[in-house]
Amino acid sequence: MDEVEALERLVRRYSPSGREGLAVREFVRIARALGYATHTDRVGNGIARRGRGHPRIVYLGHIDTVEGRLRVRRRGGRLYGRGTVDAKGPLAAALLAGRDLPGTGEYVVVAAVGEETDSRGARYLVRRARPDAVIGGEPSGWNGVTIGYKGELRLELTFRGERTHLSSPFPTATDLLVDWLGAVRSFVAARPKESPFRSLTTKVVEVVTARHDGEETARVVIDFRLPPSISTEELLRSLPPAVGASLAVRIRDEPLEVDRSNPVVASLVEGVRAAGGRPTLWHKGGTTDLNLALPVWRVPGAAYGPGEAHLDHTDQESVSLEELARSVSVLRVALTRLRSGVLTPRGSDGGA
């Protein structure tokens, strides 16, 4: 089996968040055929492992996708289909790269569930696994390595008020909501503007208003993307007060930026060079399961995988078959280097 067959089999199992079961079972079948020991954990993550002991390297990918079926087909040296980029392509490359690895230690490939929504798979895993290094399975391009992701804070605020005549001098619940959004936009605009990665941004996800008997409500869901210079706690403290509103935190992931000289980054860079490429280090505006995992595990890490990130979540999602093959070579060099003694083992037992 090669990486193209493995990926096509994964992509043909449609797996939007919450419906990953068929794809996880296919992942397990593919991993077993490649010589991995496999299981599915309590929340549905697919786990493939080979080897034992230290160093313990985890490739933290995800098997779920956004909604929207796409026809799976090969054309013009590319494979088209939902998940080819985000992020079944990285998973297929990780499985093929780990086949018959030289050296000692344990290599674990995780097909996590729920990354596109609540990251339930990663949240379950991070309290149980104890790796020495982690590679996030996200598209970076075969010659790129991602060393930074913005944080995310998603809030839901509900403004309530008494229903009054529109000629009344008192503000409606919707007025209060609109005024607060204006204050938030002014707050964000006043913050220092640097590169897109190092700037705070915000978008309104949803606004719903309703009237029932004598009460009116106005609800807003708002999403913030945070640079490394501001934590979610700091942002919550700094936001303009929302008078008369109840607040619920829906998503809270801290920003992430790793040391560009850490062993995982260095090993991936070496792999890119060995494959004839010029390495590029990326900072991205999205968030991934690495945002959750690295602050808990506190080990060297970075993200790597085939695919062009601008095709994520689009109807043009596809991956170059040549790039897919090159990424397998890059990962194999990186994993071999990481197993050769450049890591400092944590010295604790336990695994995914």
Image: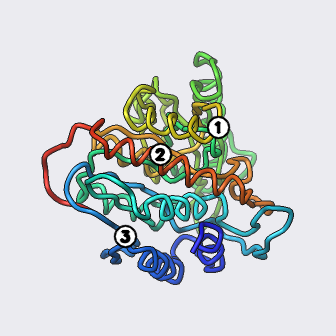
* Residue at 39% across, 71% down: 45
Q: Of label 1 and label 3, which has the lower sequence position? A: 3
Q: Which residue is mark 3?
A: 47
Closer to the camera, 197 or 129?
129
State the separation of the CA atoms marked 2 and 1: 12 Å
Going by the image, does 329 lie left or right of 251?
Answer: right
User: Quick check: 246 above or below 150?
Assistant: below
Real-space Cα separation, disc 2 to disc 3, in angstroms: 22 Å
Q: Which callout, 1 or 3, points to the residue nearer the camera?
A: 1
Residue 244 appears left or right of 107: right
Number of the label disc, if any, that sits on residue 333: 2
Q: Residues within 10 Å of mark 3 (few under 14, many from 20)?
A: many
Q: Amino acid at mark 2?
A: Val
Q: Position of residue 350 (x, y in %)?
A: 17, 59
Residue receiving disc 1: 276
Return the mark for residue 6: none
Residue type for callout 1: Gly
